[in-house]
Protein backbone atom coordinates (compact mmCIF):
# COMPACT_ATOMS: atom_id res chain seq x y z
CA UNK A 1 0.00 0.00 0.00
CA UNK A 2 1.44 3.35 -1.03
CA UNK A 3 0.60 6.42 1.02
CA UNK A 4 1.93 9.65 -0.45
CA UNK A 5 3.20 12.35 1.88
CA UNK A 6 3.74 16.06 1.43
CA UNK A 7 5.64 18.50 3.61
CA UNK A 8 3.80 21.83 3.83
CA UNK A 9 5.22 25.37 4.06
CA UNK A 10 4.60 25.06 7.81
CA UNK A 11 7.35 22.71 9.06
CA UNK A 12 5.05 21.49 11.85
CA UNK A 13 2.45 20.15 9.35
CA UNK A 14 2.68 17.12 7.06
CA UNK A 15 -0.05 15.79 4.78
CA UNK A 16 -0.66 12.09 4.15
CA UNK A 17 -2.67 10.97 1.09
CA UNK A 18 -4.01 7.42 1.51
CA UNK A 19 -5.02 5.32 -1.52
CA UNK A 20 -8.58 4.89 -0.24
CA UNK A 21 -11.04 7.28 1.45
CA UNK A 22 -10.68 7.84 5.19
CA UNK A 23 -14.22 9.19 5.59
CA UNK A 24 -17.28 9.26 3.36
CA UNK A 25 -17.85 13.01 3.34
CA UNK A 26 -16.94 16.24 5.08
CA UNK A 27 -14.00 16.80 7.34
CA UNK A 28 -13.02 16.13 10.94
CA UNK A 29 -10.55 17.93 13.18
CA UNK A 30 -9.05 16.57 16.39
CA UNK A 31 -7.14 18.77 18.78
CA UNK A 32 -8.05 17.46 22.23
CA UNK A 33 -8.70 14.24 24.14
CA UNK A 34 -12.48 14.77 24.32
CA UNK A 35 -12.83 14.77 20.53
CA UNK A 36 -10.80 11.56 20.13
CA UNK A 37 -13.71 9.31 21.10
CA UNK A 38 -15.13 9.97 17.63
CA UNK A 39 -12.10 8.50 15.87
CA UNK A 40 -10.24 5.26 16.55
CA UNK A 41 -7.58 6.41 14.06
CA UNK A 42 -7.08 9.73 15.88
CA UNK A 43 -6.78 7.89 19.20
CA UNK A 44 -4.03 5.63 17.85
CA UNK A 45 -2.15 8.55 16.31
CA UNK A 46 -2.31 10.70 19.46
CA UNK A 47 -1.09 7.67 21.47
CA UNK A 48 2.17 7.92 19.49
CA UNK A 49 2.91 11.18 21.29
CA UNK A 50 4.27 14.35 19.74
CA UNK A 51 1.08 15.13 17.78
CA UNK A 52 -0.72 18.42 18.35
CA UNK A 53 -3.73 18.08 16.01
CA UNK A 54 -5.21 16.12 13.10
CA UNK A 55 -7.39 17.18 10.18
CA UNK A 56 -9.11 14.45 8.16
CA UNK A 57 -10.93 14.58 4.81
CA UNK A 58 -11.83 11.72 2.50
CA UNK A 59 -8.43 11.81 0.80
CA UNK A 60 -6.20 13.59 3.31
CA UNK A 61 -4.79 13.20 6.79
CA UNK A 62 -3.07 16.43 7.83
CA UNK A 63 -0.93 16.04 10.97
CA UNK A 64 0.39 18.94 13.03
CA UNK A 65 3.24 17.86 15.28
CA UNK A 66 4.40 19.43 18.50
CA UNK A 67 7.40 21.74 18.08
CA UNK A 68 9.80 19.44 19.97
CA UNK A 69 8.85 16.35 17.93
CA UNK A 70 10.72 15.12 14.87
CA UNK A 71 9.20 14.04 11.55
CA UNK A 72 12.02 11.50 11.26
CA UNK A 73 10.52 9.73 14.28
CA UNK A 74 6.83 10.43 13.71
CA UNK A 75 6.41 9.90 9.97
CA UNK A 76 7.14 6.12 9.91
CA UNK A 77 4.93 5.58 12.96
CA UNK A 78 2.06 7.56 11.42
CA UNK A 79 2.39 5.63 8.15
CA UNK A 80 2.31 2.31 10.04
CA UNK A 81 -0.81 3.28 12.04
CA UNK A 82 -2.51 4.60 8.90
CA UNK A 83 -1.76 1.37 6.98
CA UNK A 84 -3.02 -0.75 9.88
CA UNK A 85 -6.19 1.30 10.06
CA UNK A 86 -6.83 1.16 6.30
CA UNK A 87 -6.33 -2.63 6.29
CA UNK A 88 -9.25 -3.02 8.73
CA UNK A 89 -11.66 -1.17 6.42
CA UNK A 90 -13.05 0.74 9.42
CA UNK A 91 -14.19 4.35 9.25
CA UNK A 92 -11.61 6.86 10.48
CA UNK A 93 -14.38 8.89 12.12
CA UNK A 94 -17.44 7.51 13.87
CA UNK A 95 -20.62 9.34 12.87
CA UNK A 96 -22.42 10.28 16.06
CA UNK A 97 -25.63 11.04 14.19
CA UNK A 98 -25.59 14.68 15.20
CA UNK A 99 -26.16 15.75 11.63
CA UNK A 100 -24.38 18.54 9.87
CA UNK A 101 -26.05 21.90 10.17
CA UNK A 102 -24.34 25.18 9.36
CA UNK A 103 -22.23 24.92 12.50
CA UNK A 104 -20.69 21.74 11.10
CA UNK A 105 -20.06 23.48 7.76
CA UNK A 106 -18.35 26.38 9.53
CA UNK A 107 -16.17 23.94 11.50
CA UNK A 108 -15.18 22.21 8.28
CA UNK A 109 -14.40 25.54 6.57
CA UNK A 110 -12.26 26.68 9.49
CA UNK A 111 -10.47 23.33 9.64
CA UNK A 112 -9.66 23.37 5.94
CA UNK A 113 -8.48 26.97 6.10
CA UNK A 114 -6.21 26.09 9.01
CA UNK A 115 -4.77 22.88 7.55
CA UNK A 116 -4.44 23.59 3.86
CA UNK A 117 -4.79 27.28 3.05
CA UNK A 118 -3.26 29.37 5.85
CA UNK A 119 0.17 27.67 5.63
CA UNK A 120 0.43 28.59 1.94
CA UNK A 121 -0.73 32.17 2.50
CA UNK A 122 1.64 32.58 5.45
CA UNK A 123 4.53 31.50 3.23
CA UNK A 124 3.93 34.70 1.23
CA UNK A 125 3.98 36.82 4.40
CA UNK A 126 0.24 37.12 4.77
CA UNK A 127 -2.66 35.50 6.52
CA UNK A 128 -6.29 34.63 5.86
CA UNK A 129 -8.94 34.78 8.57
CA UNK A 130 -12.45 33.31 8.47
CA UNK A 131 -15.11 35.97 9.11
CA UNK A 132 -18.51 34.53 8.18
CA UNK A 133 -20.47 31.94 6.18
CA UNK A 134 -23.86 33.04 4.80
CA UNK A 135 -25.98 31.70 1.95
CA UNK A 136 -23.17 29.49 0.65
CA UNK A 137 -20.63 32.33 0.64
CA UNK A 138 -17.49 32.22 2.77
CA UNK A 139 -16.24 35.65 3.84
CA UNK A 140 -12.55 35.90 4.70
CA UNK A 141 -10.15 38.71 5.47
CA UNK A 142 -6.74 38.84 3.86
CA UNK A 143 -4.06 40.21 6.20
CA UNK A 144 -0.36 41.07 6.18
CA UNK A 145 1.28 41.15 2.76
CA UNK A 146 -1.92 39.77 1.24
CA UNK A 147 -4.09 42.72 2.34
CA UNK A 148 -4.39 44.99 -0.67
CA UNK A 149 -2.10 42.81 -2.76
CA UNK A 150 -3.03 42.90 -6.47
CA UNK A 151 -2.96 39.08 -6.48
CA UNK A 152 -5.30 38.71 -3.48
CA UNK A 153 -8.39 38.29 -5.69
CA UNK A 154 -6.63 35.61 -7.74
CA UNK A 155 -5.61 33.85 -4.52
CA UNK A 156 -9.21 33.96 -3.29
CA UNK A 157 -10.82 32.73 -6.51
CA UNK A 158 -8.20 30.37 -7.96
CA UNK A 159 -6.86 29.03 -4.68
CA UNK A 160 -9.10 29.38 -1.65
CA UNK A 161 -12.45 29.10 -3.45
CA UNK A 162 -11.39 26.06 -5.50
CA UNK A 163 -10.13 24.19 -2.44
CA UNK A 164 -13.17 24.99 -0.28
CA UNK A 165 -15.64 24.10 -3.06
CA UNK A 166 -13.82 20.82 -3.72
CA UNK A 167 -14.01 19.60 -0.13
CA UNK A 168 -17.17 21.34 1.11
CA UNK A 169 -20.07 21.19 -1.37
CA UNK A 170 -22.08 23.74 0.64
CA UNK A 171 -19.57 26.45 -0.35
CA UNK A 172 -20.66 28.32 -3.48
CA UNK A 173 -18.16 31.22 -3.42
CA UNK A 174 -15.48 32.99 -1.39
CA UNK A 175 -15.45 36.76 -0.97
CA UNK A 176 -13.22 39.29 0.70
CA UNK A 177 -14.92 40.44 3.92
CA UNK A 178 -13.79 44.08 3.50
CA UNK A 179 -15.36 44.30 0.04
CA UNK A 180 -18.62 42.71 1.23
CA UNK A 181 -19.09 45.56 3.75
CA UNK A 182 -18.86 48.09 0.91
CA UNK A 183 -21.68 46.45 -1.06
Image (cartoon, helix red, strand yellow):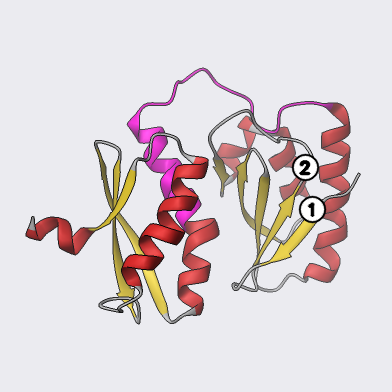
Estimate the spatial distance between the alpha carbons at disc 2 and disc 1, rounded to whole Å: 7 Å
Task: Specify the segment rendered in magenta.
Answer: 89-113
Residue under label 1, please give it: 48
Q: Position of residue 166 (x, y in %)?
A: 51, 43
Residue under label 2, please give it: 44
Q: Position of residue 150 (x, y in %)?
A: 30, 78
* Magenta stretch contains residue 44: no
Q: Position of residue 72 (x, y in %)?
A: 84, 70
Q: Is residue 30 left or right of residue 169?
A: right
Q: Quadrant of residue 65?
A: bottom right
Residue at the limit of the structure toward the right, as seen here:
1
Residue placed most toward the observer, 105 or 40: 105
Q: Position of residue 74 (x, y in %)?
A: 81, 62
Residue placed most toward the observer, 128 or 170: 170
Q: Is residue 33 above or below residue 127?
A: above
Which residue sits at x=37%, y=58%? Answer: 157
Q: Secondary structure at mark 2?
A: helix
Q: Is residue 106 left or right of residue 180?
A: right
Q: Is residue 124 above or below residue 105?
A: below
The quadrant of the rendering that contains the N terminus is top right
Which residue sits at x=60%, y=73%? Answer: 9
Q: Residues within 10 Å of mark 2 (few under 14, many from 20)?
A: some
The answer to whether mark 2 and mark 1 are in CB contact below 8 A is: yes
Q: Is residue 37 left or right of residue 139?
A: right
* Magenta stretch contains residue 100: yes
The quadrant of the rendering that contains the C terminus is bottom left
Amino acid sequence: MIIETQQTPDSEVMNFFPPQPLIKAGTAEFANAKSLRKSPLAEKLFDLGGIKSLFITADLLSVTKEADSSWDDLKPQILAELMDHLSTGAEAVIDDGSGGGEDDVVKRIKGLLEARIRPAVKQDGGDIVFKDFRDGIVYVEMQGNCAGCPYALITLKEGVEKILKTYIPEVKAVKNFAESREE
